[in-house]
Every structure is written in C-alpha cells, then in structure tokens.
Amino acid sequence: MKPPMKKPKKLNKADRELIAAASAAIKRRYRLDWQTVGAALRTRSGQIFTGVNLDAYLGRMAVCAEAVALGRAFVDLGDAGIETIVAVRHPRPDEKSQAIAVVSPCGACRELIFDYDAKARVIVPNGKSPAIVSIGDLLPNKYIRESDR
Ligand SMILES: [Zn+2]
C-alpha cells in the first residue's frame, strides 16, 4: 500500500520564475547526451542559482544539475538553505515534443536536497501543470546512520 501523499500545491510567480531560470540554463548549455537537464534553486536569502548536469564518459562520474546548482550556491553564500528547487529536461532533437519540461529529482538528489534543507520545496511534474511538494514528502523514511539515531 502506498503511503498517503499530501495534496501538491500550485505554483506561485516565484516558482514559475525558477522554472524559467532552469529552462534558460539548459537551453543555453544543451549538448546532446552531455548536458540535458537544467536546475534552479532559490536560497533562503532569495538568490537564484542555476546548474546543468555534467554527464561523463565514465557514467558513474556524472553529476546532476541540482548538485551543480547547489554547489554554485554554496561557493558563493555558504549554507544558505534551499527555499525551492526545480529540475527541467531538454528533449533530444528527434523527440516529438520539443518542450522543456519539469522532471522529478532522482533519488540521490532527494537525499542531497534533504541534507541541505529538510524543509525545501520541490517543483515536480503533476499532469498538465507542475506542482509543489516538500522534500520530506519525496523522501519518506530517509536513510539515517545508526550512530545518528
Ligand atoms: Zn539527481
């Protein structure tokens, strides 16, 4: 049985700006098979940082766009939290739809986002229009080391 999910919330203007920032980042840096996902986050201090994924010939060295955005924020501001974060995917040239669309953070990014702000809002796909959920909703029963209990 699936645990009950809280009802996703609708986006506000600032959320739509974040999607636009992530979309602009991947539109600018898209390279087939190398850079296909953009991300943007807003820190608790209100600043926006963007990233794109770093794919790699050695696949396990690949880094997600969310991690790149978080790294850029951390270098500039230190631990400034994540008020809201979003990732978007750029389609391949041969795909029918050429729309850049919101994608969910992968499992590893869910862990990372939670570690840097347990109250982060995450923009996720939700049918026709994306929605807001909390990182806790995306990561129930998070991994915790026995020594941290
Ligand atoms: Zn990821």
Image (cartoon, rainbow, N blue to C red):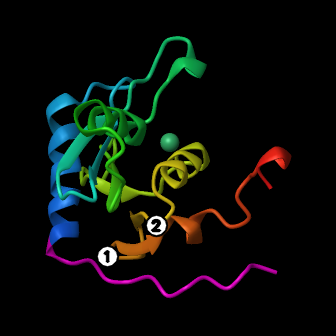
Question: Which image quarter: residue 92?
Answer: top left
Looking at the rendered image, the quarter that the N terminus falls into is bottom right
Answer few, some or many: residues within 10 Å of disc 2's Cα (few below 14, many 20 plus, some between 14 and 19).
Answer: some
CB under 8 Å between discs 1 and 2:
no
Going from N to C along the chain, the mark reached first, 1 or 2, is 2
Front tag of 1 and 2: 2
| Type of amino acid at the residue the image marks with label 1 | Ser
Extreme right residue here?
146
In the image, taking residue 88 as reference, residue 125 lies left or right, namely: right
84 versus 147 height, above or below: below
- Which residue does the image show at 51% across and 64% down from the upper left? 135
- Which residue does the image show at 39% across and 24% down from the upper left? 54
- Which residue does the image show at 29% across and 30% down from the upper left? 75
| Type of amino acid at the residue the image marks with label 2 | Lys
Residue 4 magenta-drawn?
yes
**Extent of the magenta region:** 1-13
Q: Position of residue 26 (x, y in %)?
A: 23, 38
Looking at the rendered image, the quarter that the C terminus falls into is bottom right
Which secondary structure dominates the residues rendered in magenta?
loop
Residue 92 visible in the picture: no
State the residue position of label 2: 119
State the residue position of label 1: 129
User: Separation of disc 1 and disc 2 at Cα?
Assistant: 22 Å
